[in-house]
Image (cartoon, rainbow, N blue to C red):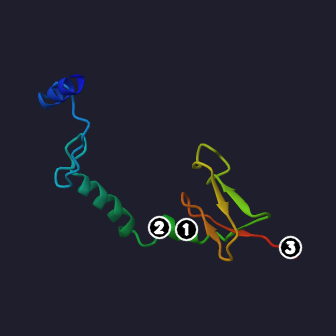
Amino acid sequence: MASNLLKALIRSQILPSSRRNFSVAAATTQLGIPTDDLVGNHTAKWMQDRSKKSPMELISEVPPIKVVGRTAACEGDTNTALGHPIEFICLDLHEPAICKYCGLRYVQDHHH
């Protein structure tokens, strides 16, 4: 009974539907700007000035961080306000392990 009443209220637009409209063609911001324009402009900003390096190029220049032990804990920055959620990274592989949030690379420091 209650579910029928809820369905009727949603159909009559008194209550909003929990379903979302995922139509890409109609995607706009609250100001009516198409989201495709925002993404395109953001990407174009990075592509215009070739004298500056992209964030991916900058992070790839940081050498892998050596860690004693089998696990690294990455927070992105020493200042927690500028970092990301903590990620524990397994270092059992031979190649450097990469943080999924910030791209920093970690490698196990072997002292034999």
Q: Are marks 1 and 2 in contact (CB under 8 Å)?
A: yes
Q: Counting other residues with Cα less than 10 Å from the Cα at mark 1, is it few (<14), some (14-19), or many (20 or more)? A: few
Q: Position of residue 62 (x, y in %)?
A: 63, 69
Q: Name the one closer to the observer, 44 or 74.
A: 74
Q: Which mark is residue 58?
A: 1
Q: Is residue 89 above or below residue 21?
A: below
Report, in whole angstroms, how far the alpha carbon at label 2 lies from the one at label 3.
35 Å
Q: Are marks 1 and 3 in contact (CB under 8 Å)?
A: no
What residue appears at the point 13 percent right and 31 percent down from the top-left corner? 11
Q: Which mark is residue 112?
A: none
Amino acid type at circle 3 is His
Report, in whole angstroms, how far the alpha carbon at label 1 lies from the one at label 3.
29 Å
Where residue 5 sits, quadrant-wise, is top left
What residue appears at the point 54 percent right and 57 percent down from the top-left corner? 101
Q: Earlier in the sequence, mark 2 or mark 3?
A: 2
Amino acid type at circle 1 is Leu
**Element class at badge 2:** loop
Q: Is residue 108 above or below residue 24?
A: below
Amino acid type at circle 2 is Ser
Q: Position of residue 36 (x, y in %)?
A: 24, 57
The residue positioned farthest toward the right in the image shown: 112
Q: Say which of marks 2 and 3 sits in front.
A: 3
Q: Earlier in the sequence, mark 1 or mark 3?
A: 1
Q: Counting other residues with Cα less than 10 Å from the Cα at mark 2, is it few (<14), some (14-19), or many (20 or more)? A: few
Q: Which residue is mark 3?
A: 111
Q: Name the one closer to the observer, 2 or 105.
A: 2
Q: Position of residue 80 (x, y in %)?
A: 63, 44
Lateral position of residue 8 relative to residue 36, left or right:
left
Q: Say which of marks 1 and 3 sits in front.
A: 3
Q: Which residue is mark 2?
A: 54
